[in-house]
Image (tube, rainbow, N blue to C red):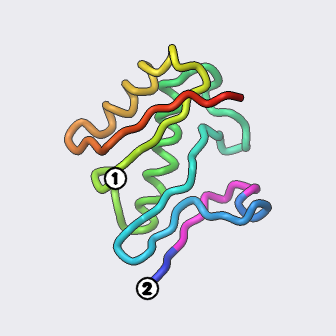
Amino acid sequence: MKFQRTFSAAPWEAEVGYCRALRAGAHIYVTGTAPVDDAGGVFAPGDGYGQAGRCLALIERALHDLGAARAHIVRTRMFVTDISRWPSTAGRIASSSATSPPRRQWSKSKH
């Protein structure tokens, strides 16, 4: 099986030992994605819509590097720290895949 990897240049990729996304044959696996800005800080603090958009941009870049696009996504999983704020995050996710919605899972995470 052929493997292809892409990296986001986040400093912790090398520290922890992972890549942004991995193509294994016909499948692409994307690692967990957080709303990190280019300097390594939090992108759009407190703005679920903006943070979801940032995560999608990072994922889309990785997919592009591996020859795929958002329309090829078959499953997403979102973790939010405040479940009452899920509508803003969901709104951004839904607007990005209106013509090809994947399977979705939402979870509240404790921090």
Does the segment drawn in magenta span residue 53? no
At which x and y percent is residue 52?
49, 33
Residue that numbered label 1 is attached to: 73
In this image, 1 relative to 40: left or right? left
**Residue under the point 52% across and 24% down:** 48
Structural distance between the alpha carbons of marks 2 and 1: 21 Å
The residue singled out by tag 2 in the image is: 1
- 2 vs 1, front mark: 2
Mark 2 burial class by Cα count in 10 Å: few <14, some 14-19, many 20+: few
Q: How many marks overall?
A: 2
Report the amino acid beneath label 1.
Ile
Residue 40 lies, with reference to residue 63, above or below; the image says above
Q: Quadrant of residue 12?
A: bottom right
Q: Residue at x 47, y 25 (%)?
A: 49
In the rendered image, residue 93, in percent from the top left (x then y), is placed at 38, 33
Looking at the image, residue 28 sits to the left or right of residue 74; the answer is right
Q: Is residue 99 left or right of residue 55?
A: left
- Specify the amino acid type for callout 2: Met
SS under mark 2 = loop
The correct choice, above or below, for 31 with respect to 36 in the image is below
Label 1 Cα crowd, 10 Å radius (few <14 / some 14-19 / many 20+): some
Question: Image quarter for residue 100?
Answer: top left
List x then y, in percent, for residue 97.
Answer: 29, 40
Between residue 7 and residue 79, name the one nearer to us.
79
Which secondary structure lies at badge 1? loop
Per the rendered image, the range of residues in magenta is 5-12
The residue sitting at 72% across, 43% down in the picture is 39
Indicate whether 15 appears above or below 81.
below
**Residue 39, label in figure:** none
Image quarter for residue 63? Answer: bottom left
